[in-house]
Amino acid sequence: MSYRPTTAQFALGVFTVVAATVALLAATGVSGVLGVAVVVLFALALGTLVTVLAAPAPHAADRRAEHRAPVGGHE
């Protein structure tokens, strides 16, 4: 089963990346290319994590239906 984030989840992840980047750059005061790259990569990882965690958990009935096989070959 593949997972595709909704538009709202994607927007939340993008907002998290931008906000975390701005906040971390302001708080740390880094100015070198390597420092900025590290901050941006950290913010990107944080945004990805937020996007994944914003996904709703599947219901137990949905999980059971995925694993149920047809019985007797009749539809």
Image: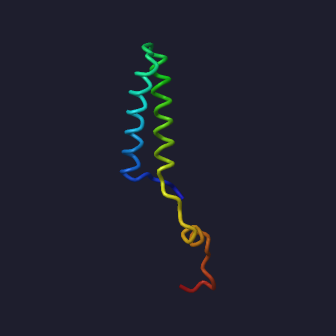
Residue 47, given in percent of the width and then of the height, sits at 46, 39
Q: Nearer the viewer, residue 75 or 29?
A: 29
The image shows residue 15, relative to residue 59, as above or below, that is above
66 above or below 4? below
Q: Residue at x 45, y 53 (%)?
A: 4
In the picture as drawn, the residue positioned furthest to the top comes out as 32
Q: Residue at x 53, y 85 (%)?
A: 75
Instruction: Name the foreground residue: 15 vs 6.
Output: 15
Quadrant of the frame with the N terminus? bottom right
Image point 50% across, 23% down: which residue? 38
The image position of residue 3, as x and y in percent, is 49, 54
Q: Quadrant of residue 18?
A: top left
Quadrant location of residue 62? bottom right
Q: Position of residue 72 (x, y in %)?
A: 63, 85
Q: How many marks?
A: 0
Rendered position, 69 above or below 2: below
Residue furthest toward the front?
27
In this rendering, position of residue 24 left or right of residue 60: left
Please tell me which residue is depicted at 61% across the width and 74% down the height of the picture. Answer: 68
| Structure colour scheme | rainbow
